[in-house]
Image (cartoon, coloured by chain):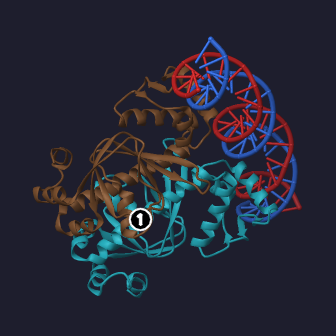
Chain colours: A brown, B cyan, C red, D blue
Amino acid sequence: MEDLIENYGYLFEDELLKEIHEIGIYKSVKEGDVLIEIGDYIKSMPLLLNGAIKILREDKEGEELALYFIERGDTCTMTLSCCVGNSKSEIRAVAETDVHLIMIPVQKMSEWMRKYSSWQEFILQSYHSRMMEMLEAIDTIAFLKMDERLLKYLRDKAMVSHNDQLQVKHKDIAQDLHTSRVVVSRLLKKLERDNKIKLFRNRIKVIAL
Amino acid sequence: MEDLIENYGYLFEDELLKEIHEIGIYKSVKEGDVLIEIGDYIKSMPLLLNGAIKILREDKEGEELALYFIERGDTCTMTLSCCVGNSKSEIRAVAETDVHLIMIPVQKMSEWMRKYSSWQEFILQSYHSRMMEMLEAIDTIAFLKMDERLLKYLRDKAMVSHNDQLQVKHKDIAQDLHTSRVVVSRLLKKLERDNKIKLFRNRIKVIAL
DNA sequence: GTAGCTATGTAACAAATGTTACATGAAATT
DNA sequence: AATTTCATGTAACATTTGTTACATAGCTAC
C-alpha cells in the first residue's frame, strides 16, 4: 500500500486508491520473466510500482526487436489497447529488472474511466506517453545508424536499471537490436575506442551517460 | 450531414451525431495541403469523412518518413494525444487525396468522453487502431528490406486512393521512405522486371494488389 | 523547332551492415 | 589439470544501401 501511494498517490483520489488497493492483485516478477506473451488474451492491466519492463516486437520469423522500456508509475498501454479491441497482445513484455506491480481486472478499467476523472486522465496520459515512446522507437530505427542505436540502447538500459554497469552479453544486445552478434561486437569495440563505454566479460560499463 | 451519418451513424447515438453536426466545423482540404504541421498546438480534432491523410515524421535534419495513412471513419489520434498532453504536434499530416472532414473543438472531446459511452469507445478504439498502425510502421522499417518497403508503400498508396495508377515521382517516394531517389529508381526498375508494377513518366501502375 | 527544365535510367564507387569462419581466453565441468 | 562450453575478437567477404556523376527522353515555353 505504501508503494501504491508513493507511486500513484499524487495522481489518484483517495477513494480510487482504496479501490485499487482492494481489487488489485499485488505481484512480484523476477528479472527475465515474461509478463505478457505475443498472442495472449489480456484479462488485467499492470500498474508498475517499481522496476522496469522491456517491450518487444517480433516478426514472422520470430526475430525480436526491443521497442522501449516502461518504468514505475507507468502502465502497459498496449494492454489497454488490446482490451478495448478485445484482441490478442501484439507485443511481448519481459521484466528488465525485478518488478513489483498491481494487476487490475480489465472490467474495472472502463468502469473507473467514468467514475474517476483522475483515472480517465491517467489512461489518456498513458496512451500519450506510449505513443511518444513508439515515435521515439521509430525515430531510432529509421534515422539512427547502428552504432548510435547501440549507444542509445545501452544508455536507456543503464537508466532504467539505475546502474551504469550492465550485465549483458553481446548476443542478447544483438537480439534486442535485431542485428547480428558480430556487428554488435564490432561496434561495441568502436564505442570503447571512442571512450563511450568499457568492455568486460559479461559486463559493459557505460561511461558517457 | 449525410456524410456524417454514412461514416459514423453506426458508431454514435443520434444525440451525439446531432451535437457533432451542430458543433463541428465542416472542412474541405485539397490534395497535398498540410493539415497539421510539426510543432502546431492542437485546438481541434478531425473526423475524416472521406479521402485519406498521410502521417509523416521528421528528424532533426528535416528528413521525412511516412508512417501510415488514415482513412474515412478514422480520426487522428495523435491529435487527441497531443491535446491530453497539452503539447505540440509531433507529426505532420498531409492530405493524400482531396479530403472532407469535421473539426471538433478539443473541449468537447473530454466532455463527450463522460457523456457518451459510444464516444469513449470510439476514442479508445482509435487509440488502438493508431497503436496498431504504429506497430506496423515499426515492423516495416525494422524487418523489411527497402524493395519490400517500397512495394508495400505503393500498394498502401493505391489502396487509400482507390486507384492502381499512382501519380508520383520517384523523388517523392524517396522522401516518404527516407532514402534517395537513385535507390528508389533502381528498386522500382527491379519491381517492374519482376512484374509487380509498370513504370511511366510521373505515373506508376501497381499490378499485384 | 529549339532551348531549357524535369524525370528517369544507369554506371561506378563508397559506406554500412550482414555472414562465415576461426582464434583466443575465461569459466564451468569432469 | 584436462576438457568442454561459452563469450568475445577479428578477418575476409557478400549484400544492401547511399552517393556522385552523367546520359537520355519527355515536356514546356519561347
Residue A69: percent from left, percent from top: 40, 44
Left or right of B37 in this view: A111: left
Q: Is residue A74 visible?
A: yes
Question: Residue shown at 66%/47% (left/top)?
Answer: B180
Q: Amino acid at mark 1?
A: Tyr
Which image quarter: residue B44? bottom left
Of residues B134 and B167, the one nearer the viewer is B134
If the image is split into quadrants, where does the C terminus of chain A sit? top left
Residue B149: percent from left, percent from top: 64, 56
- Above or below: residue A94 compared with residue B159: above
Residue D7: percent from left, percent from top: 56, 29
Question: Residue shown at 54%/45% (left/top)?
Answer: A141
- Above or below: residue B14 compared with residue B68: below
Looking at the image, the residue that sits furthest to the left is: A14
- Above or below: residue A55 compared with residue D10: below
Q: Which residue is mark 1?
A: A41
Instruction: Tell me the element at label 1.
Output: loop
Q: Residues within 10 Å of mark 1 (few under 14, many from 20)?
A: some
Question: Residue shown at 36%/69% (left/top)?
Answer: A84
Residue B96: percent from left, percent from top: 54, 67
